[in-house]
Image (cartoon, coloured by chain):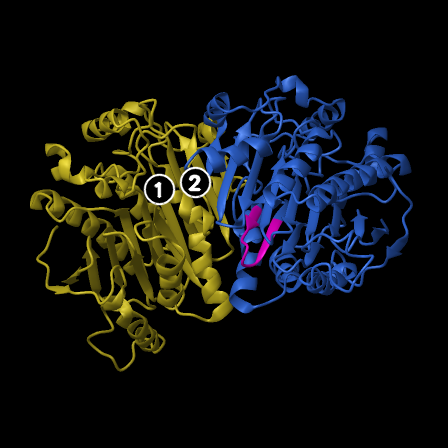
Chain colours: A yellow, B blue
Amino acid sequence: MMCIPATVFSLAEGGSSAPFSHIAERTEAQKNISENPKGEVAGQAAEIPDRAFAIALHGGAGVISRDIDPKIRDEYLESLEEAIRLGVRLLEDGAEALDVVEAVVRIMEDNPLFNAGKGAVMTNQESFELDASIMDGRDLSAGAVAGVRTVKNPISLARMVMTESRHVLFAGEGAERFADLMEVERVDQDYFYTERRHEQLKRARERDEVILDHSQDESETGYLETENEESRFFDDSKMGTVGVAVLDIYGNLAAGTSTGGMTNKRFGRVGDSPIIGAGTYADNASCAVSSTGTGEEFIRHAVAYQIAAIMEYTGASLNQAARTVVHDKLRPGDGGIIAVSHTGEIALVFNSPGMFRAAANSDGRIEIGIWEEVISIAE
Amino acid sequence: MMCIPATVFSLAEGGSSAPFSHIAERTEAQKNISENPKGEVAGQAAEIPDRAFAIALHGGAGVISRDIDPKIRDEYLESLEEAIRLGVRLLEDGAEALDVVEAVVRIMEDNPLFNAGKGAVMTNQESFELDASIMDGRDLSAGAVAGVRTVKNPISLARMVMTESRHVLFAGEGAERFADLMEVERVDQDYFYTERRHEQLKRARERDEVILDHSQDESETGYLETENEESRFFDDSKMGTVGVAVLDIYGNLAAGTSTGGMTNKRFGRVGDSPIIGAGTYADNASCAVSSTGTGEEFIRHAVAYQIAAIMEYTGASLNQAARTVVHDKLRPGDGGIIAVSHTGEIALVFNSPGMFRAAANSDGRIEIGIWEEVISIAE
């Protein structure tokens, strides 16, 4: 599954998506080709979908040491590639944006490397409380769940809130009762357990503090340098949240986000992931966005919606809008966003040292990255 | 406390705030006076605060029959007047915006006429689950609680989330545990009980449906016309939510919102009231907003933040921004907002037949309203 990095781009600015800036134009060109079906572009036409698509995803943002074990790093890269390739395959087959968002978030939820679904971080009570949200850019319908404990794939329950209820957000025990009425796979809390997350909780308790899943406070206090052997596997109590944004071949946008929240969380703390407008937003008129980072800051700045609003009300491009919010509104280190626009533009913008991410479009390119540089994979 | 309506304005458009459009200019004039302290405007200066202030509040929006018992109508008008006069008195005494928001929301929570605190609507389980949020325009700090059951004044707990934790939103049992650590008045669920809300729940169950606290579906199906004697007291299962927005004499903005949610709610449904960006927003650079209506629509459109974003990114006035969102983005009947801007402009905009509301400023005017027309009270 893992293939050889063909090119490594060096980005002009931390977390900007310069290597992707060509995508918008190519996508427009692609559309022109596809609107001339079975036309003069013989030979290419067979591989080209009828219309352009674009997909971006993240597996969390934060402090990611470059001194990690290369084997672990490659596991993350392989997982990101597996997820983006699933999305591309579905989109090429004509899948709709919402279905692609749900499917790609699900495989990241099922992957214990990420802080969502299996492998989620543990609360102060040694339990797991999961949040997710999804939004349909066609009509702004949306669904979200907060604090669910027995649902294997919270993104799928969030979608059912959207389609099977008149509401947007169900929380806690109530969300579990809603799940009882839905055909959704249930698991024991043990299912979510990983030894690594338990170790993180123990360390967090020793320090008697709540670790933000993406905070870099500890690195500033030297924590990253002093921790034990386990840190070779990243101090990924600071990693969090998976998210996907999609433009499908029908021109529809959708986005979804899923998380286990933060290690050692208490008081039923809800971050930005289940909050429509903060963690997730999608509007066919502008863009689809998923956020990852210090959730409280993303709520205060309504980050996902603010990017859409800047596009709508100023005519800015997706990358202009995303950079304004991530670099001018958020604080350095807060995290980042992945997004796709209604024209197929892709933005992968972060102000933390790293963000697990991947993006692809109907142009045939697939790119993945952890730190500033991007690994570009020829198909 | 209740005084004689001095003037009744007829509004040009449903729910617009035309009678208040003079306030912004007068407030600016007021500022000019106050920036010339102890100047030539002798005689007036003694009553005039050093700087302009403005306050707006709501007690819910929805279908409010004009055929109500005048006695009941007057009880609402008196309660709105009591709340706005408290705010004015505090602001004249130099209170800060956050303190005014909290104090005014609290007396509305304590008033059984409104669906917040005492008098909240009942859930499907015959219990009370309360939501509230508050935001400080100085630094975008914010706090919110969802689904609390034993806190007399949820707005005060929301403020403690803002000031006493690093987080924004605590939900359900976790929020109760946070309350255990705070000095906040606790009550039994019985405290919130009113016979009227119990009757509403029984009727909702008979109809075997969840009534949105502001939905006008039932009026369209003739429900308002056919219900029993109790309807003289409004069918205020449809009324919901109280909220306050304030500009204090120091030029700071704050907003807060509190609600019991919707009659017969299930599944831990969370509406817009505890969602920063949807139910509440405040930014000193633009405005302070509190929403009331069909919460799901207010979440999808990030209503409170969207108004601030339009002001910030287009330079629109508060009323232009608010009308764009309420009349062009929301659906007719969804509800409305109250807001004040950093320049002292006031907006009271709704697209439902009525919205309980009041507003005042340092110019000495106090205005209250239920339907389109506004009752203006000379001091």
Does residue A71 appear in this view?
Answer: yes
State the separation of the CA atoms marked 1 and 2.
Answer: 9 Å
Q: Magenta stretch: residue A262 in it?
A: no
User: Eyeballing the image, is A248 above or below A221?
Assistant: below
Tag 1: Cα neighbours inside 10 Å, few (<14), some, or many (≥20)?
A: many
Q: Residue at x 83, y 54 (%)?
A: B373
Q: Which residues are magenta?
A: B280-289
- Secondary structure under tag 2 reads helix
Name the chain under label 1. A
Q: Position of residue B61 (x, y in %)?
A: 71, 45
Mark 1 vs 2: CB contact within 8 A: yes
Q: Magenta stretch: residue B288 in it?
A: yes
The residue nearer to you, when weighing A194 against B163, is B163
Does residue B269 appear in this view?
Answer: no
Q: Position of residue A101 (x, y in %)?
A: 35, 50
**Marking on residue A258:** 1
Q: Position of residue A250 (x, y in %)?
A: 40, 63
Name the chain under label 2. A
Q: Is residue A116 left or right of residue B286?
A: left
Amino acid type, residue under disc 2 in the picture: Ala
Label 2 belongs to which residue? Answer: A158
Between tags 1 and 2, which lies in front?
1
Q: Residue at x 37, y 28 (%)?
A: A149
Q: Using the rendered view, name the quadrant where residue A7 is placed.
A: bottom left
Q: Residue at x 26, y 57 (%)?
A: A88
The residue nearer to you, when weighing B161 against B338, is B161
Q: Which quarter of the rendered picture does the C terminus of chain A lie within?
A: bottom left
